[in-house]
Image: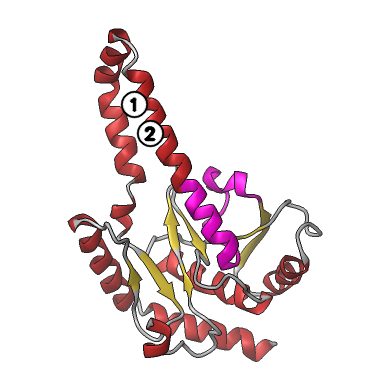
Amino acid sequence: AATLKLRTLAGVDRPAIATVMPTPKEPFVLLDAGANPDSTPEMLLQYAVMGSIYSREILGVENPSVGLLSIGEEEGKGNESTKKTFSLLTQSAVNFVGNVESRDLYAAKVSVAVCDGFVGNVVLKTSEAVAKMISNWLKRMFKQNVLRMLGYLFARGVFKEMKSHADPSSYGGAPLLGANGVVIIGHGSSNAIATFNAIRVAVEAIDHDVNHLIEAELKSINSKA
Protein backbone atom coordinates (compact mmCIF):
# COMPACT_ATOMS: atom_id res chain seq x y z
CA ALA A 1 0.00 0.00 0.00
CA ALA A 2 2.87 2.38 0.85
CA THR A 3 4.56 1.63 -2.47
CA LEU A 4 1.39 2.26 -4.47
CA LYS A 5 0.62 5.47 -2.60
CA LEU A 6 4.10 6.96 -2.26
CA ARG A 7 5.90 5.27 -5.18
CA THR A 8 9.62 4.57 -4.96
CA LEU A 9 12.73 6.70 -4.73
CA ALA A 10 14.67 7.34 -7.94
CA GLY A 11 16.91 4.34 -8.62
CA VAL A 12 14.92 1.92 -6.43
CA ASP A 13 13.09 -0.94 -8.12
CA ARG A 14 11.20 -2.02 -5.00
CA PRO A 15 11.36 -0.95 -1.35
CA ALA A 16 12.77 -3.40 1.18
CA ILE A 17 11.91 -4.06 4.82
CA ALA A 18 14.94 -3.43 7.03
CA THR A 19 14.86 -5.14 10.42
CA VAL A 20 17.32 -4.25 13.17
CA MET A 21 18.50 -7.48 14.81
CA PRO A 22 20.26 -7.58 18.22
CA THR A 23 23.59 -9.28 18.92
CA PRO A 24 25.74 -9.46 22.09
CA LYS A 25 27.76 -6.60 20.57
CA GLU A 26 26.16 -4.20 18.10
CA PRO A 27 22.86 -4.73 16.23
CA PHE A 28 22.88 -5.41 12.50
CA VAL A 29 20.39 -4.55 9.78
CA LEU A 30 18.75 -7.42 7.88
CA LEU A 31 17.12 -6.63 4.55
CA ASP A 32 14.98 -7.55 2.78
CA ALA A 33 12.98 -9.06 5.66
CA GLY A 34 9.93 -9.97 3.61
CA ALA A 35 8.77 -7.33 1.13
CA ASN A 36 10.16 -9.00 -2.02
CA PRO A 37 10.44 -12.82 -2.01
CA ASP A 38 11.97 -12.69 -5.50
CA SER A 39 14.77 -10.14 -5.76
CA THR A 40 17.15 -9.58 -8.65
CA PRO A 41 20.89 -9.02 -8.08
CA GLU A 42 20.35 -5.36 -8.98
CA MET A 43 17.73 -5.09 -6.24
CA LEU A 44 20.08 -6.74 -3.74
CA LEU A 45 22.69 -4.11 -4.59
CA GLN A 46 20.08 -1.44 -3.86
CA TYR A 47 19.33 -3.11 -0.52
CA ALA A 48 23.03 -2.99 0.34
CA VAL A 49 23.18 0.74 -0.36
CA MET A 50 19.99 1.49 1.58
CA GLY A 51 21.00 -0.70 4.51
CA SER A 52 24.44 0.91 4.71
CA ILE A 53 22.99 4.40 4.79
CA TYR A 54 20.43 3.42 7.43
CA SER A 55 23.10 1.76 9.57
CA ARG A 56 25.37 4.79 9.31
CA GLU A 57 22.78 7.53 9.77
CA ILE A 58 20.35 5.94 12.26
CA LEU A 59 22.43 3.35 14.14
CA GLY A 60 25.59 5.45 14.13
CA VAL A 61 27.94 2.89 12.55
CA GLU A 62 30.83 4.84 11.05
CA ASN A 63 31.63 2.60 8.09
CA PRO A 64 29.00 -0.17 7.95
CA SER A 65 30.23 -3.52 6.68
CA VAL A 66 27.94 -5.35 4.26
CA GLY A 67 27.65 -9.11 3.98
CA LEU A 68 25.72 -11.14 1.41
CA LEU A 69 23.79 -13.93 3.11
CA SER A 70 24.74 -17.22 1.45
CA ILE A 71 25.50 -20.88 2.16
CA GLY A 72 29.24 -20.36 2.40
CA GLU A 73 31.83 -17.62 2.80
CA GLU A 74 33.67 -18.46 -0.41
CA GLU A 75 32.98 -16.30 -3.47
CA GLY A 76 31.74 -19.22 -5.54
CA LYS A 77 29.18 -20.41 -2.99
CA GLY A 78 25.45 -19.80 -3.47
CA ASN A 79 22.98 -19.80 -6.34
CA GLU A 80 23.28 -17.86 -9.60
CA SER A 81 21.58 -14.82 -8.08
CA THR A 82 23.95 -14.54 -5.12
CA LYS A 83 26.99 -15.12 -7.35
CA LYS A 84 25.97 -12.25 -9.62
CA THR A 85 25.14 -10.09 -6.61
CA PHE A 86 28.58 -10.83 -5.19
CA SER A 87 30.12 -9.42 -8.34
CA LEU A 88 27.95 -6.29 -8.27
CA LEU A 89 28.70 -5.63 -4.61
CA THR A 90 32.43 -6.11 -5.16
CA GLN A 91 32.37 -3.37 -7.81
CA SER A 92 30.21 -1.00 -5.75
CA ALA A 93 31.20 1.69 -3.26
CA VAL A 94 29.66 -0.09 -0.24
CA ASN A 95 31.98 -1.66 2.34
CA PHE A 96 31.37 -5.19 1.08
CA VAL A 97 33.18 -7.88 3.10
CA GLY A 98 31.92 -10.92 1.18
CA ASN A 99 29.48 -13.72 1.86
CA VAL A 100 28.22 -14.37 5.37
CA GLU A 101 26.53 -17.51 6.66
CA SER A 102 23.41 -17.36 8.83
CA ARG A 103 25.27 -18.90 11.78
CA ASP A 104 27.60 -15.88 11.82
CA LEU A 105 24.91 -13.19 11.84
CA TYR A 106 24.67 -13.00 15.63
CA ALA A 107 28.44 -12.84 16.00
CA ALA A 108 28.20 -9.26 14.71
CA LYS A 109 30.45 -10.01 11.74
CA VAL A 110 28.61 -7.50 9.56
CA SER A 111 26.61 -4.30 10.07
CA VAL A 112 24.26 -5.07 7.18
CA ALA A 113 23.12 -8.51 5.98
CA VAL A 114 21.61 -8.55 2.48
CA CYS A 115 19.29 -11.21 1.07
CA ASP A 116 16.01 -11.56 -0.80
CA GLY A 117 12.72 -11.23 1.08
CA PHE A 118 12.10 -15.00 1.14
CA VAL A 119 15.37 -15.80 2.89
CA GLY A 120 15.16 -12.72 5.12
CA ASN A 121 11.68 -13.54 6.37
CA VAL A 122 12.73 -17.13 7.14
CA VAL A 123 15.74 -15.84 9.11
CA LEU A 124 13.58 -13.32 11.00
CA LYS A 125 10.82 -15.75 11.99
CA THR A 126 13.26 -18.55 12.86
CA SER A 127 15.19 -16.15 15.09
CA GLU A 128 11.97 -15.08 16.84
CA ALA A 129 10.98 -18.72 17.40
CA VAL A 130 14.38 -19.68 18.81
CA ALA A 131 14.37 -16.69 21.17
CA LYS A 132 10.91 -17.63 22.44
CA MET A 133 11.93 -21.28 22.87
CA ILE A 134 15.01 -20.35 24.94
CA SER A 135 12.93 -18.02 27.11
CA ASN A 136 10.31 -20.68 27.82
CA TRP A 137 13.01 -23.28 28.34
CA LEU A 138 14.79 -21.18 30.96
CA LYS A 139 11.55 -20.45 32.82
CA ARG A 140 10.69 -24.15 32.99
CA MET A 141 14.18 -25.16 34.16
CA PHE A 142 14.33 -22.51 36.89
CA LYS A 143 10.99 -23.70 38.29
CA GLN A 144 12.17 -27.30 38.76
CA ASN A 145 13.36 -26.88 42.37
CA VAL A 146 13.89 -24.32 45.14
CA LEU A 147 17.64 -23.98 44.62
CA ARG A 148 17.16 -23.07 40.98
CA MET A 149 14.47 -20.56 41.90
CA LEU A 150 16.88 -18.96 44.38
CA GLY A 151 19.52 -18.91 41.66
CA TYR A 152 17.08 -17.07 39.42
CA LEU A 153 16.49 -14.44 42.11
CA PHE A 154 20.23 -13.77 42.32
CA ALA A 155 20.56 -13.62 38.51
CA ARG A 156 17.34 -11.70 37.89
CA GLY A 157 19.19 -8.47 37.10
CA VAL A 158 21.20 -10.22 34.37
CA PHE A 159 18.08 -11.64 32.73
CA LYS A 160 16.35 -8.27 32.91
CA GLU A 161 19.32 -6.58 31.22
CA MET A 162 19.46 -9.29 28.53
CA LYS A 163 15.73 -8.93 27.84
CA SER A 164 16.07 -5.16 27.57
CA HIS A 165 19.01 -5.51 25.16
CA ALA A 166 17.04 -7.83 22.87
CA ASP A 167 13.68 -6.05 23.18
CA PRO A 168 12.47 -5.19 19.64
CA SER A 169 10.36 -2.32 20.99
CA SER A 170 13.57 -0.34 21.58
CA TYR A 171 14.11 -0.21 17.81
CA GLY A 172 10.56 1.01 17.14
CA GLY A 173 9.75 -0.93 14.00
CA ALA A 174 11.04 -1.92 10.60
CA PRO A 175 11.59 0.88 8.06
CA LEU A 176 10.44 0.31 4.50
CA LEU A 177 13.54 1.66 2.77
CA GLY A 178 13.19 2.87 -0.79
CA ALA A 179 9.67 4.26 -0.55
CA ASN A 180 9.30 7.91 -1.51
CA GLY A 181 8.54 8.92 2.05
CA VAL A 182 9.22 7.69 5.56
CA VAL A 183 7.42 4.42 6.36
CA ILE A 184 7.91 2.50 9.61
CA ILE A 185 6.22 -0.90 9.86
CA GLY A 186 5.09 -1.70 13.40
CA HIS A 187 4.05 -5.06 14.80
CA GLY A 188 0.37 -5.59 15.49
CA SER A 189 1.17 -6.02 19.17
CA SER A 190 3.40 -2.93 19.41
CA ASN A 191 3.28 -1.32 22.86
CA ALA A 192 3.64 2.36 23.76
CA ILE A 193 7.45 2.15 23.88
CA ALA A 194 7.61 0.59 20.40
CA THR A 195 5.26 3.25 19.01
CA PHE A 196 7.31 6.02 20.62
CA ASN A 197 10.54 4.63 19.13
CA ALA A 198 8.91 4.17 15.71
CA ILE A 199 8.11 7.90 15.70
CA ARG A 200 11.63 8.66 16.94
CA VAL A 201 13.20 6.63 14.11
CA ALA A 202 10.94 8.35 11.55
CA VAL A 203 12.05 11.77 12.81
CA GLU A 204 15.72 10.70 12.68
CA ALA A 205 15.28 9.48 9.09
CA ILE A 206 14.00 12.93 8.15
CA ASP A 207 16.66 14.81 10.14
CA HIS A 208 19.43 12.74 8.53
CA ASP A 209 17.92 13.12 5.05
CA VAL A 210 18.10 9.34 4.54
CA ASN A 211 16.00 9.26 1.36
CA HIS A 212 18.04 11.90 -0.43
CA LEU A 213 21.24 10.11 0.54
CA ILE A 214 19.86 6.87 -0.91
CA GLU A 215 18.93 8.57 -4.18
CA ALA A 216 22.32 10.26 -4.47
CA GLU A 217 24.26 7.03 -3.83
CA LEU A 218 22.17 5.01 -6.29
CA LYS A 219 22.49 7.75 -8.92
CA SER A 220 26.27 7.62 -8.53
CA ILE A 221 26.27 3.83 -8.93
CA ASN A 222 23.99 3.90 -11.99
CA SER A 223 26.09 6.58 -13.68
CA LYS A 224 29.13 4.31 -13.43
CA ALA A 225 27.30 1.22 -14.72
Residue 100, image x, y percentages: 65, 53
Pick out the residue farthest to the right.
Answer: 76
- Image disc number at residue 215: none
Where's residue 138, x and y in %?
38, 26
Task: Name the image quarter holding the C terminus.
Answer: bottom right
Circle 2 — which element? helix
9 left or right of 11?
left
Q: Which mark is residue 135?
A: 2
Name the quarter where the N terminus is drawn. bottom left
* Quadrant of residue 70 within the rendered picture: bottom right
Q: In the rendered image, which residue does mark 1 sit on?
A: 139
Left or right of 38? Residue 146 is left
Asked whether residue 199 is drawn in magenta, I would say no
Looking at the picture, the colour scheme in use is secondary structure
Local packing at callout 1 (Cα closer than 10 Å; few below 14, some 14-19, many 20+) is: few
Q: Nearer the viewer, residue 154 or 223?
A: 154
The residue at the point 44 percent across, 48 percent down is: 26
**Main secondary structure of the magenta stretch:** helix
Q: Pointer 2 and pointer 1: residues touching (CB < 8 Å)?
A: yes
Dot 2 amino acid type: Ser
Residue 116 on the magenta segment? yes
Which amino acid is tagged 1?
Lys
